[in-house]
Amino acid sequence: MKNGLLVGVGAMITLLGVIFTLQGIGAIGGSGMSGSSFWAVAGPVIAVIGLVLAAIGLRRRSAT
């Protein structure tokens, strides 16, 4: 169950990173984050962290 939670949290963090990236490059408007180069750079970093967490959860699940 703990591994499933890790995969779910990792997927949510990845989704947030993608949204932050899209806002940072201006593809999604309507917020203070829109068009900000900080979020265009931070978004992919956040998405990669989420992918790593999900991968760890999946590796642990397949190992047991």
Image (cartoon, helix red, strand yellow):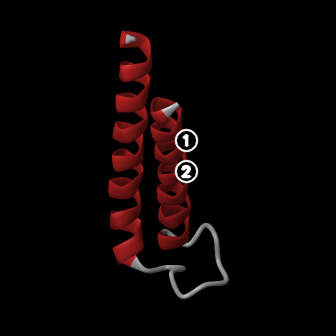
Q: Is residue 14 above or below residue 16?
A: above
Answer whether labels 2 and 1 touch (C-beta < 8 Å): yes
Q: Is residue 5 above or below residue 39?
A: above
User: Which residue occupies 42% across, 51% down?
Assistant: 47
Q: Residue at x 43, y 24 (%)?
A: 58
Task: Name the secondary structure under disc 1.
Answer: helix
Query: Furthest residue to the front?
Result: 1
Regarding mark 2 in the picture, which secondary structure is present there?
helix
User: Residue 10 placed where, x, y %?
Assistant: 46, 44
Q: Which residue is mark 1?
A: 8
Q: Residue furthest bottom?
A: 32
Residue at the right extreme?
30
Classify mark 1: residues with Cα within 10 Å, few (<14), some (14-19) or many (20+). Answer: some
Give the x, y percent position of residue 54: 43, 35
Going by the numbered disc 1, the residue's amino acid type is Gly
**Residue type beneath disc 2:** Met
Mark 2 or 1, which is nearer the eye? 1
Residue found 40% across the figure and 67% down from its top: 40
Number of the label disc, if any, that sits on residue 12: 2
Q: Quadrant of the C terminus?
A: top left
Note whether 3 is above or below 47 in the view shown: above
Q: Is residue 5 left or right of residue 62?
A: right
Q: CA distance from mark 2 to mark 1?
A: 6 Å
For the image, the number of numbered tags is 2
